[in-house]
Image (cartoon, grey):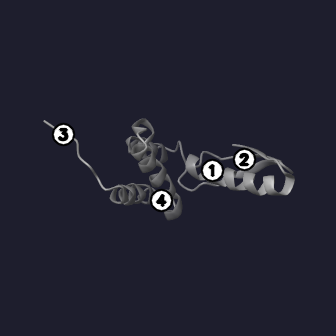
């Protein structure tokens, strides 16, 4: 008996976005997290996919992760930066760090940004 079911990726992303937005994550950040989880599933990495929806939601509920990400640049030295994420959402922090690394690399020819 085949018990596999297919769920439309867009609907699953919308559902996961609603879960995180309902937990206080800003809509754009909630969509980013939802998209990364669904993409992991689509790429065959279920251990990093929507399976984590409840775990991340639980971390927000119990204070292990803040729903609103407020990064702080604790080192800002030309091509080098270090960001304290203050227990914000990892995907959001990664997006911020990547954008900042690109900006720094364009200015300095190289960049290193740590989280």
First in residue order: circle 3 vs circle 4 = 3
Crowding at label 2, few (<14), some or many (≥20) Cα neighbours within 10 Å? some
Crowding at label 1, few (<14), some or many (≥20) Cα neighbours within 10 Å? many
- Which label lies toward us, 3 or 4? 3
Q: Which residue is mark 1?
A: 93
First in residue order: circle 1 vs circle 3 = 3
* Observer able to see residue 115: yes
First in residue order: circle 3 vs circle 2 = 3
**Residue 97 image position (x, y, % from top left):** 68, 50
The reply to whether callout 2 and callout 1 are in contact (CB within 8 Å) is yes
Q: Secondary structure at mark 4?
A: helix
Total marks in image = 4
Residue located farthest toward the bottom when viewing the structure as drawn: 27
The reply to whether callout 4 and callout 1 are in contact (CB within 8 Å) is no
Q: Which residue is mark 2?
A: 83
Crowding at label 4, few (<14), some or many (≥20) Cα neighbours within 10 Å? many
Checking the image for residue 31, the label placed there is 4
Point out the image quarter for the C terminus. Answer: top right
Q: Which residue is mark 3?
A: 3
User: Residue sitting at 65 percent across and 47 percent down?
Assistant: 85
First in residue order: circle 2 vs circle 1 = 2
- Which label lies toward us, 1 or 3? 3
The CA span between labels 2 and 1 is: 8 Å
Question: Which is more toward the observer, 68 or 115?
Answer: 115
Q: Secondary structure at mark 2?
A: strand
- Which label lies toward us, 3 or 2? 3
Q: Is residue 112 above or below residue 108?
A: above
């Amino acid at each position: 008996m085949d018990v596999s079911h297919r769920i439309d990726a867009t609907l699953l992303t919308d559902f996961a976005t609603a879960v995180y937005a309902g937990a206080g994550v800003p809509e754009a950040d909630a969509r980013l997290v939802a998209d990364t989880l669904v993409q992991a599933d689509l790429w065959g990495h279920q251990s990093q996919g929507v399976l984590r929806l409840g775990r991340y939601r639980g971390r927000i509920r119990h204070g292990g992760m803040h729903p609103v990400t407020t990064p702080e640049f604790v080192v800002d030295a030309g091509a080098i930066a270090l960001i304290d994420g203050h227990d914000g959402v990892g995907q959001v922090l990664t997006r911020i760090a990547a954008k900042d690394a690109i900006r720094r690399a364009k200015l300095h020819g190289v960049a290193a940004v740590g989280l």
